[in-house]
Image (cartoon, grey):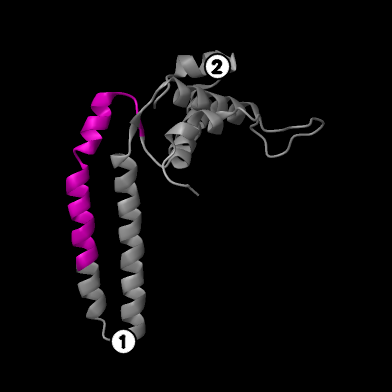
Amino acid sequence: MLIDLPTAKAHIRDDAAPDDQVQLYLRAAEQSAEQWLNRRIYATPEELTAALLTVPAASLAAVTAYDAALVAADALGDVRLVLDARAQAGRVYDRAADAIREIRDGIVINDLIKAGILLLFGHLYASREDVVIGVTASELPQGSKHLWQPYRRGLGV
């Protein structure tokens, strides 16, 4: 986890909050940040460097698997099966390439990213139900996405 439990509990002003519940919402906020940023977030420069060292081998493995899937697809004989298998191989390769790109574009957490994660975590923790009764809720215009915007890669989902 990028943010420790004491920091998270201090943010929500609830030292008695159950650790497992805090960890769940904190992990969700961290994963949301990575998805929105289209890049992995690392706690230290050393963790980022270690992850970057895996990129060449992961790239080679993805290309090798894609090439093997194409050969297997072509061996199916029936044109419809070949086309379907080739399309599936392309989708699998694209997912692998996206994961590699997220690592390659990785970033070490900074105060803006951390503040955005804490804002989202606080919202998730405070709003643990699907329905809110008797209040008007609205998104804060200067929320987590505003803090993360300068670090975003691509348009996202």
Q: Position of residue 156 (x, y in %)?
A: 47, 47
**Image height of 80 relative to 4, above or below:** below
SS for tag 1?
loop
The circle drawn on residue 78 is 1
Position of 148 compared to 136: left or right? left
Note whether 7 is above or below 64 in the view shown. above
List the residue tagged with mark 2. Answer: 11
Q: Quadrant of residue 51?
A: top left
Looking at the rendered structure, which numbered label has been put on residue 28?
A: none
**Place of residue 77 in the rendered image (x, y in percent of width and height, measured from the top left):** 26, 86
Q: Look at label 1 and name its amino acid.
A: Asp
For the residue carrying disc 2, how many other residues have a C-alpha within 10 Å: few (<14), some (14-19), or many (20+)?
Answer: some
Region rendered in magenta: 41-67
**Closer to the camera, 145 or 41?**
145
Residue 59 belongs to magenta span: yes
User: Which residue is found at the position 78% from the left and 32% from the top?
Assistant: 136
Residue occupying the point 24% across, 79% down:
74
Along the viewing direction, whichever of 19 and 82 lies nearer the viewer: 82
Q: Is residue 65 left or right of residue 150?
A: left
Residue 33 sits inside the magenta stretch: no
**Sooner in the amino-acid sequence: mark 2 or mark 1:** 2
Q: Amino acid at mark 2?
A: His
Prevailing secondary structure of the magenta residues: helix
Q: Farthest front residue? A: 150
On the rendered image, what quadrant is the N terminus found in? top left
